[in-house]
Image (tube, rainbow, N blue to C red):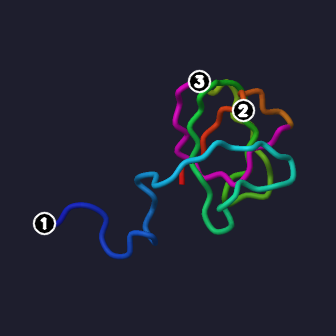
């Protein structure tokens, strides 16, 4: 019995981050590198987070996200509007 992800790792669901960078919130510009795949988020300082999910064209607000929380969802944009979480959001690629 083999362990781990089989086949082409890049084509599989992401199980580990291989890169990270601070998110610049914008109402008009997507997070760099999200043309084909969104990123997960790590929240340094909590609050509300208004995001554009990978498979959607409508923003959604996650309310009361706690500091130190990992959000296992794929997002393409974090909006300035309606985001009260501090600028310290980290994109996990």
- Label 1 crowding class (10 Å Cα cut-off): few <14, some 14-19, many 20+? few
Under tag 1, what secondary structure?
loop
Disc 1: which residue: 1
Q: Which residues are magenta?
A: 67-80
Sequence-wise, which precedes: disc 2 or disc 1?
1
* Quarter that holds the N terminus: bottom left
Among the 4 quarters of the image, the one containing residue 46: top right
32 left or right, relative to 8: right
Alpha carbon of mark 3 to alpha carbon of mark 1: how far? Answer: 39 Å
Alpha carbon of mark 3 to alpha carbon of mark 2: how far? Answer: 14 Å
Disc 3: which residue: 66
Q: Is residue 76 magenta?
A: yes
Sequence-wise, which precedes: disc 3 or disc 2?
3
Task: State whether residue 27 is above or below residue 38.
Answer: above
Disc 2: which residue: 87
- Label 3 crowding class (10 Å Cα cut-off): few <14, some 14-19, many 20+? some
Residue located 31% across and 64% down the image: 5
Dominant SS in magenta? strand
Nearest the viewer among 14 and 25 is: 25
The tally of labels here is 3
9 left or right, relative to 87: left
Residue located 46% across and 72% down the image: 11
- Label 2 crowding class (10 Å Cα cut-off): few <14, some 14-19, many 20+? some
Q: Position of residue 9 (x, y in %)?
A: 39, 69
Q: Are marks 3 and 2 in contact (CB under 8 Å)?
A: no
60 left or right, relative to 93: right
Sequence-wise, which precedes: disc 3 or disc 1?
1
Residue located 66% across and 58% down the image: 54
Q: Position of residue 17 (x, y in %)?
A: 46, 52
Q: Is residue 31 magenta?
A: no
């Amino acid at each position: 019995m083999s362990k781990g992800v089989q086949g082409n790792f890049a084509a599989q669901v992401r199980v580990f981050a291989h890169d990270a960078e601070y998110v610049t919130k914008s109402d008009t510009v997507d997070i760099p590198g999200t043309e084909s795949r969104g990123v997960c988020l790590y929240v340094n300082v909590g609050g509300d987070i208004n995001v554009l999910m990978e498979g959607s064209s409508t923003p959604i607000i996650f309310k009361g996200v706690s500091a130190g929380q990992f959000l296992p969802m794929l997002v393409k944009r974090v909006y300035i509007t309606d985001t009260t979480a501090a600028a310290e959001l980290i994109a996990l690629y």
